[in-house]
Image (spheres, rainbow, N blue to C red):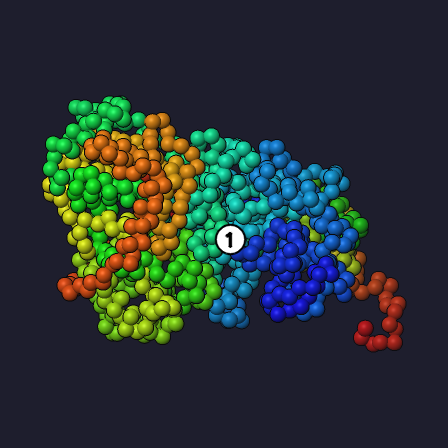
Amino acid sequence: MSIKKISKDQPKDFVFSEKNLELAEKILAKYPKDKKQSGVMALLYLTQRQNDNWIPLAAMKYIAKFLEMPYIKVFEVATFYSMYNLTPVGKHFIQICTTTPCMLRGAYKLVDICKRKISDDQNILSKDKSCSWTEVECLGACVNAPMMQINDDYYEDLDEKTAEKIIDQILNGIKPKPGSYRGRINSEPENNRQTLMDLKNA
Amino acid sequence: MLKLKVNEIDIEVEEGLTVLQACEQAGVEIPRFCYHEKLSIAGNCRMCLVEIEKSPKPIASCAMPATEGMNIKTNTSKVEKARKGVMEFLLANHPLDCPVCDQGGECDLQDQSMFYGIDKSRYKENKRYVPEKYMGPLIKTQMTRCIHCTRCIRFATEVAGVPELGAIGRGEDMQITTYLEKSMESELSANVIDLCPVGALTSKPYVFEARPWELKKTETIDVMDAVGSNIRVDTYGWEVKRILPRINEDINEEWISDKSRYACDGLQNQRLDIPYIKKDGIFEKSSWEEAYEIISKKIYSTSSDEIAGLTGDLTNMETLFITKEFFSKTIKSSNLDSRAEHIFVNNDERSNYLFNSTINAIEESDFILLVGSNPRYEATILNARIRKSYLKNNTEIYSIGDLGNLTYPYTVLKNTTEIIKEIIEDKHEVSNKIKNSKKPIIIVGQSVLKLDSANYIIEKIKEYLKYNNKINNEWNAFNILSNNASTVGSYDLNILSSKEKNNKVLNGIENNKFKILFLLGLDDINFKKNNEFIVYIGSHGDKGAEISDVILPGAAYTEQDGFFTNLEGKIQKAYKASYPPGEAKEDWLILNELASKIKSKKLYKNKDELEKSMMNYLKLTNNEKNKKNFENFRFVNEKIILNEIDYYYSNVIARSSKTMSRCRQEKMKLKETGTEG
């Protein structure tokens, strides 16, 4: 991982949509009046949702003014967390977990597929600009490794074949079915339960 | 008091100290990078690890409060190992380019790695590279060297009050930068260079100029404003290479303003190094003898009341005193004044023109009212104190007139004298605030002294404060903020041609009444020259030299010993760090020689005699002064228009400085693009 690149193409202005403005007020109501800054992460996320999954500089300024805090403080938070995208990403944003458990189970094979099918580099969008991918740290689905996240959904228990299929579907505009690709429900054991048999709802 | 043990030595320390401070009191040195006593505690460099009994792990002493019965050990093998480990991590990504680093020789990292580190590195991987950041014309960055102590960020946010620095990214990719690499917008910005324990932030104008061990260090006093910051002038041969702050808790703590620090390259430019005589409108080089000859001839042929003199903003007190003696004894004229503007002053009492509350006591204050002054530009260091007070006591600050960003919040009152009248007559909400405050501070600026009702305002405010017991033996709430280093000194020496606002000399000059005019380092004067014969004694070729007929080259503040009284009335001596250029002479010597030419007798045998005589005069006048009450109060309802301050161009030295010009351009650029503030 290296420091996040800031996009060169920046929109001039940014304002919250009416709906998000309402939401932002609701978020700020949770904090004492003089501690508004606490809401910065939530507001950055709102921004990202509103602005095609990335945060432009104008939005950071807007939030800084909104929360009465220095620009640099917002900038610090936005660059710290990998959840925030500071350059435009594809409509389908693929995040591949490459932390140890996923890596051991073959996450780099998924990365290779993305490199082949989407783009060579993480910061570059696919040819039709609809899709981009990135490596990320642990997404907390280690039991179902390897896995990737596409927009809001997790695709788990992947191998080269299933991953390729999923990406093909996405590139063709079909939404693949989220969840385990080895037929598991969530992260239950594959051949039924072996332990804690005396408990009903374990 | 807490009783604790440091390395088996029993000591008692106050409560509320950290382990590191307790160790310091016990005389045990603890290495540190991020900890700085004037800044908040960060605890992120881990260099100050110590062992505390019953604690399984070494503890960062800077962030650990000292408690009763602690047994602290700093000399065990565990501590030594911990320090070595931390040092190795800090150096893992550090480029080790000391031979080409400006910090070399005065670098905390260099010194501490010699003392506490190991002699080799086990780090075989590639080192991190961080691109350079732009932080304005004063700060050169080499961010690969940064060890992320965050001192600079904390300084900018806390002391300077411009939260523009920050750390972006995380982990190994953490970088210190300003928002989108804008220049830092503070008059204290260059202090981050001193704070930086490594060579990440170094001085841009001083880049590759000299090594610290080659420089001659002279401890002296700054003259860029009236605060009288304590500085250290580093010279290489004749040249002043740089200026650094010296710790004085009563005045500048350990900061100095950018102007104090960087105007020094103006000492090399535009210097007058040989006497000049104007012939047919063109300056011609001449000798001292010739120049003295012309002046004395002119003085012989002119009656003494047609000779006048004005002293300048950077003149030291010896020069002021010998000028006074020169005028009273040699020329026998009373036309000498130190005010180049129509400014009110009542020097019957010393407290009438001093910053009486003292700079240090600003921290204790709980209410501050600014009357027609902008401390950010007039006295930057003082402004930092006001900010400190605001952070410490949540001091309420009011200002008559909108001053823009002062680095702390304040309430703006309308900028008319009517408001002051209301306050004095208890008709304004501020009146109650002053009364209820334990230690209020009223700061009156020079802009007010120029007003027609200056007399009324000053005397009435004083009367009001006395009536409400805010001027007593312990506290004096009445403060005048002088702008120039020489102002208080010249009032102390009574260099005034007439009392109060009336300025006989300036009136005369404006009406072209004088035939000979002496300008002692005075450049900020506007009048229409008629037929006056003007003698300019000063260091730089600026406005004053331009209009003169004879130029006598003098010395700047780093080139002669001299006393300066700061705005609180503290008298401090500035020491000679280098020599006047070319044939230029020390100011007092010029007047002494001129006097001996005219009267064939020197005023003083040597500098010591002059100094003694001046000190005697100061003692006598301070005892002698009889108070006089003014009757002719005149109130005029008028607007208080703040003096426009061109911060980076406020005196001759700053105007000759390339660095100051660059700073000024940068600031104008920010103003134009509207990104300011």
Q: Residue at x 57, y 54 (%)?
A: B36
Please indicate whether residue B590 sits to the left or right of residue A93 in the image: left
User: At 36% from the left edge and 56% from the top edge, which residue is drawn?
Assistant: B568
Secondary structure beneath disc 1?
helix
The answer to which quarter of the image holds residue B526 is top left
Q: Nearer the viewer, residue B441 or A53?
A: B441
- Provide the residue designation for mark 1: B155
Residue A142's quadrant in the figure? bottom right
Residue type highlighted by circle 1:
Phe
Judging from the image, mark 1 belongs to the subunit labelled B
Q: Is residue B541 shown left or right of residue B199?
A: left
Which residue is found at the position 78% from the left and 52% from the top?
Answer: B77
**Closer to the camera in the image, B141 or B589:** B589
Number of callouts: 1
Residue B511: image location, x then y, percent: 11, 43
Q: Quadrant of the C terminus of chain A?
A: bottom right
Q: Is residue B143 visible?
A: no
